[in-house]
Image: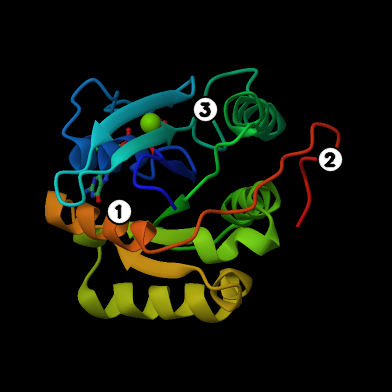
Amino acid sequence: MSSQEEIVIVVMGSTGTGKSSFINLLTGDNTVKIGNTLNSETSEIQLIRFIDPASRRKVVIVDTPGFDDSRSGVTNTNVLTTITEFLLEEYDKDRKINGLVYLHRISDTRFGGQASHNLKLFKSLCGRDNFKNVVALTTFWDRVDDETGRRREAELKAKFMKDLVEGGAHFMRHDRSMEGDRKVLKHILTLASTNHSYSRRDPCRG
Ligand SMILES: Nc1nc2c(ncn2[C@@H]2O[C@H](COP(=O)(O)OP(=O)(O)OP(=O)(O)O)[C@@H](O)[C@H]2O)c(=O)[nH]1
Ligand SMILES: [Mg+2]
């Protein structure tokens, strides 16, 4: 890829998993809204542009509204449609997505109906061919002891996110540090961009 090209990274995951916090740390951009209430914070898709100091590459991060959005009248389908429409408008020309970061709280005690529904939505939006461009980023490690965290991570890889693993997705842990988050970016910079083509009629491929 040319060093002039912008690196595009889309960040997704259930509401409150720490997407905006991750982006804020990575970019040092304090204008990214982080939720401190029980309501979902990011209601619109937000673009954050910055230059990675390590690689000098131009990076654009796409912050998305969380799935299972807690605002009334917002359904998962709405959120999925919004994201798909946005990606179509912005990136169906020459732009390719370099990385998709999917956040999951390791502190969640169960991988329940909502979590598996959200993961399914993510996978359909992403498409199986692009799983190699996925970073499954687990958050809230400060809320679990090491042993519990390790066990849940192993379970995610072996069971709930098995097909992501098989498709080449990379697992990483968010440690709430800028250095940790830069490692996510460093990994994405090593990947070839996706061959994404979104279809308006059929966003649920994969
Ligand atoms: N303890 C802990 N709190 C975290 C972590 N990451 C984020 N938070 C907190 O979790 C809350 C929600 O974080 P956000 O970054 O707003 O989550 P989001 O995924 O952007 O949420 P939506 O925009 O609603 O989809 C905030 O109070 C954060 O400070 C983490 O790793 N550990
Ligand atoms: Mg947010």
> Image height check: is 83 above or below 52?
above
Q: Nearer the viewer, residue 112 or 171?
A: 171
Residue named by callout 3? 70
For residue 39, say whether it is visible.
no
Q: Nearer the viewer, residue 89 or 164?
A: 89
Residue named by callout 1? 185
Q: Quadrant of residue 135?
A: bottom left
Residue at left 37%, top 80%? 151
**What residue type is disc 3 on?**
Ser
Residue extending farthest right? 201
Instruction: Give the image location of residue 169, x and y in percent.
Output: 50, 68
Q: Quadrant of residue 127?
A: bottom right
CB atoms at circles 1 and 2 under 8 Å apart? no
For residue 135, say whether it is visible.
yes
Residue named by callout 2? 202
Mark 3 CB within 8 Å of ligand 1: yes
Assign ligand 1 to one image quadrant: top left
Q: Which is in the foreground here, disc 3 or disc 2?
A: 2
For residue 44, side relative to residue 26 (left or right): right
Instruction: Give the image location of residue 195, x and y in percent.
Output: 64, 52
For residue 123, side relative to residue 145 (left or right): right
Circle 1 residues within 10 Å: few <14, some 14–19, many ≥20: many
- Label whose residue precedes the other's in the sequence (1 or 2): 1
Instruction: Give the image location of residue 21, x and y in percent.
Output: 26, 38
CB atoms at circles 1 and 3 under 8 Å apart? no
Residue at left 34%, top 47%? 3
**What residue type is disc 1 on?**
Leu
